[in-house]
């Protein structure tokens, strides 16, 4: 099994927290997912990993998946969230750009 990249996990947590559809402070996120504010700071800085129970709450709030948070696999994310997080493939980006504007 591949080691977890804590810095990348932290960056994904921060991206989910700050994406426009979520837009939470560290304190707000900590309260909503049941961990301390220092835990969120430590996770976002790559010093700790988010407990699974808290990650599940984060997934429920954002539409993310555990695969995305821990492994960086964006495939199962809703399209709108992938766009917000800049996790779209070149093909998807071409489709979006080619779609008629409303």
Image (cartoon, rainbow, N blue to C red):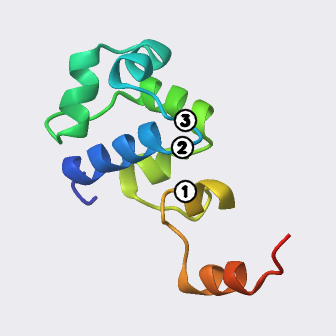
Q: Is residue 63 above or below residue 81?
A: above
Across and down, in percent, residue 84 comes to: 55, 56
Quick check: marks 2 and 3 in contact, CB under 8 Å? yes
Disc on the earlier residue, 1 or 2:
2
How far, Cα to Cα, is label 3 from label 1?
10 Å
Report helix, strand or loop for mark 1: helix
Across and down, in percent, residue 7 comes to: 20, 50
How far, Cα to Cα, is label 1 from label 2?
8 Å
> In the rendered view, does 82 fall on the left or right side of 12?
right
Q: Tell me which residue sits at (54%, 43%) in the image.
A: 20
Quick check: marks 1 and 2 in contact, CB under 8 Å? yes
Q: Tell me which residue sits at (27%, 54%) in the image.
A: 8
Residue 45 in which image quadrant: top left
Q: Quadrant of the C terminus?
A: bottom right
Residue identified by numbered label 3: 22
Residue identified by numbered label 1: 84
Report helix, strand or loop for mark 3: loop
Q: Is residue 99 above or below residue 36?
A: below
Disc on the earlier residue, 3 or 1:
3
């Amino acid at each position: 099994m591949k080691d977890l990249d804590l810095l990348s996990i932290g960056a994904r947590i921060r991206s989910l927290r700050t994406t426009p559809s979520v837009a939470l402070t560290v304190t707000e996120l900590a309260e909503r997912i049941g961990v301390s504010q220092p835990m969120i700071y430590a996770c976002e800085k790559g010093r700790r990993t988010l407990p699974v129970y808290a990650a599940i709450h984060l997934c429920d709030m954002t539409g993310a998946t555990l695969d995305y948070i821990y492994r960086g696999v964006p495939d199962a994310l809703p399209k709108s969230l992938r766009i917000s997080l800049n996790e779209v493939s070149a093909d998807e980006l071409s489709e979006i750009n080619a779609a008629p504007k409303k």
